[in-house]
Image (cartoon, coloured by chain):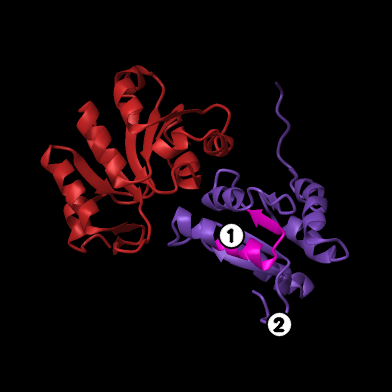
Chain colours: A red, B purple
Amino acid sequence: MPLELFRIDDRLIHGQVVVGWGQPMRLGFIVLVDDEVAASEWERELYRMGVPPEVDVVFETVEGAAARIDEFARDPRPGILLTGDVDSMARLARLCGRVRTVNLGGIHHRAGRVQRLRYVFLAPDEEGALRALEQTGIVVTAQDVPGARPVPLGDVLNGKGE
Amino acid sequence: MSNGTTPPRAIVAAHADLAAGLVSAVERITGRGAMLAAMSNVGLGAEEMEAFMRARIGDGIRAIFTDLPSGSWTMAARRAMRGSEEVVLVTGVNLAALLEFVMRDDLAPADGARACIDRARGAISLVGGVARAS
């Protein structure tokens, strides 16, 4: 499946994604799945400017991405699909049924969230949503950069990740 | 790196400890490190970074230096400076750029940031190596 990474990262497109993951995997395209970004030309242009010209960026809502998931999967170029939050990834997985792994790349501090890793903070409802994803057979791990050890969700939630 | 008495003229915001290192070098070379406020992205989410930038612009900061054009500080700065025509952002910051900026304190911060770009580009050069026949 050319979509090699399904990543939850509240910074969406940034250095870790474009350089840390993108260069070693010879990234060809990014699917940025965010309802607000998809609705804003200014936001789309902002993210487009952060990506090298050889990498295509596709902006989609959750529903739009689910409808096009087979098209993305047929693309021969390596791709990354990004959501900015757990809920969007969970909705996408439910709608398309094609998500097999989920990478927790960066979910940072916000009121109501508890720190689980240096780069992963989760609220109770987000933890529940991730557990529910795993119960459907999706493998959830936390890994900010390719060289880091993938931390299974169970270890993330049990405080054994670091 | 502000000395607590002189408000900084610009923010240097970069990955990990890079900004602190750059500002430390500026201080060591010129004694003018207090003109720059260093910020790391470690542990900060996108909303926190944007809120920080917005607050500093509200405090009067008019020049922002970031490292990667695709970096999260760059994104945060671009959002925060939206609608503030007097604020300038320089991406791809290096030490030469910051040295030029602090030495050009005769210019307004935004003009100083513009002025340092050529210096920053000119500081990157290739020395040595074997010429390749094409």
* Horizontal arrangement in the rendering, residue A135 relative to residue B3 (left or right): left
Q: Which secondary structure, mark 1?
A: helix
Quarter occupied by the N terminus of chain B:
bottom right
Report the chain holding disc 2: B
Q: B59 or A144: nearer the eye?
A: B59
Q: Residue A137, how many percent across, how many down?
A: 13, 37
Q: What residue is shown at x 60% (from left), y 44% (from top)?
A: B69
- Report the side of B42 relative to B112 (left or right): left
Q: Which residue is drawn at 73% across and 78% down?
A: B6
Q: How many marks?
A: 2
Residue nearest the observer in this picture, B63 or B69: B63
Give the percent coordinates (x, y) of residue B75: 55, 47
Pointers 2 and 1 in contact (C-beta within 8 Å)? no
Query: What x and y, as percent, mark residue A126?
Result: 24, 52
Taking the magenta stretch, the answer to whether it contains residue B14 is no
Q: Which mark, residue B53?
A: 1
Three-letter amino acid code at disc 1? Met
The answer to whether residue A62 shows anywhere in this view is yes
User: Which quadrant holds the C terminus of chain B?
Assistant: top right
* Residue at position x 78%, y 56% in the image: B110
Magenta stretch, residue numbers = B52-66
- The amino acid on which the numbered mark 2 sits, given as a three-letter code, is Thr
- Evaluate whether residue A34 shows in this view: no
Residue holding disc 2: B5
